[in-house]
Image (cartoon, coloured by chain):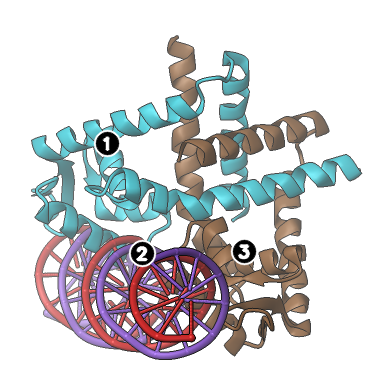
Chain colours: A brown, B cyan, C purple, D red
DNA sequence: AGAGGTAGTTGTATAGTACAACGTGAATTG
DNA sequence: CAATTCACGTTGTACTATACAACTACCTCT
């Protein structure tokens, strides 16, 4: 059982260490798009548009937070709003041409950085690591 | 190569998802000690005291950030400062009795949460996951 | 003694976040 | 169908974490 405890302890420490650094690293690498903005924009791109409320639910953010983030992205010209003709309360959000472009750049550069960090890993290890992370995050969502 | 790319993509997405949530989760679970405060206090406890500068270097934080965090912890009565008799610029920081107590509680409850999340993992998987995280974070430190 | 470096604090600014109050429009129901 | 309730989004306010720059106090070395 000692071994099991040690592993859990390490996982805890390393996940925490990673979390502490991620924002700062993202900001350093991509001053034009923060980690949060990036995530939201990527979601819009991925979903081919969605509502602010959907973003809030998906990322466990307050609707006011999303509202301000989207306002910032709109001000930068990365996002546009289309009022739903069937329900005038709803704004469907889409990346603009420019937004999609910036997103593609940041995504490419992030992917590049991850590839560098993982360059000397063999394929089986990468696969297992990816699987573990999926499993871990799924458990976290399930258990809060 | 496609498989390798997929794994890297998943790792990127899942690490990012985790990072986005970590702070909020920590704040919800432990309102008495933020993720940063917890980390700093744990380091002091672990090292049996150290300087503010050491904390800043270790966590890639600005010294002003550490200064304010420590000031907050001191105000809460969780940390005490002992001026180094050999160098009056230096304050060696230590958890107080109370600080150590709170730290122990939070640590226990965090460990409990991690154990729950990882309850149905077998020991070999836990061990591999821990190893992968260490390896990943080491690479990140190395490459920035 | 003077120059330059180190430890830490404080002023200022910014990002991200939450909660509460609000406005507007949609839906339900008595 | 009028009134109430609900859903979506914005705005006011406040707080935390953070960085950078300017500063004070102190140490070290020549």
Q: Do callouts 2 and 3 point to residues on the same chain?
A: no
Q: Could you tell me which residue is drawn at 45 percent across and 26 percent down? A: B116
Please tell me which residue lies in front, B46 or A2. Answer: A2
Quadrant placement of the N terminus of chain B: top right
**Apparent side of residue A82 relative to residue B72 in the rendered image (left or right):** right
Disc marking residue B62: 2
Q: Write down the chain letter for disc 2.
A: B
**Apparent side of residue D17 relative to residue A77 in the rendered image (left or right):** left
Q: Write down the chain letter for disc 3.
A: A
For label 2, the SS is loop
Vertical position of residue A27 compared to residue B23: above or below: below
Q: Name the residue under label 3.
A: A39
Looking at the rendered structure, the number of numbered marks drawn on it comes to: 3
Distance between the alpha carbons at the discs numbered 3 and 1? 30 Å
**Where is residue A45 drawn, in percent x and y?**
74, 68
Q: Mark 1 points at which residue?
A: B106
Distance between the alpha carbons at the discs numbered 2 and 3? 26 Å
């Amino acid at each position: 059982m000692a071994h099991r405890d040690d592993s859990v302890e390490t996982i805890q420490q390393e996940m925490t260490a990673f979390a502490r650094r991620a924002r700062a690293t993202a900001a350093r690498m991509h001053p034009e798009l923060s980690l949060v903005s990036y995530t939201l924009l990527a979601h819009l791109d991925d979903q081919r548009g969605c509502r602010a409320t959907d973003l809030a639910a998906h990322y466990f953010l307050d609707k006011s937070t999303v509202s301000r983030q989207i306002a910032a992205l709109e001000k930068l010209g990365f996002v546009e709003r289309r009022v739903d003709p069937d329900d005038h309360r709803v704004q469907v959000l889409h990346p603009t041409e420019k937004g999609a472009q910036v997103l593609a750049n940041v995504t490419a550069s992030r992917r590049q950085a991850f590839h560098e960090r993982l360059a000397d890993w063999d394929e089986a290890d990468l696969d297992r690591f990816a699987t573990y992370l999926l499993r871990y995050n799924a458990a976290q969502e399930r258990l809060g």
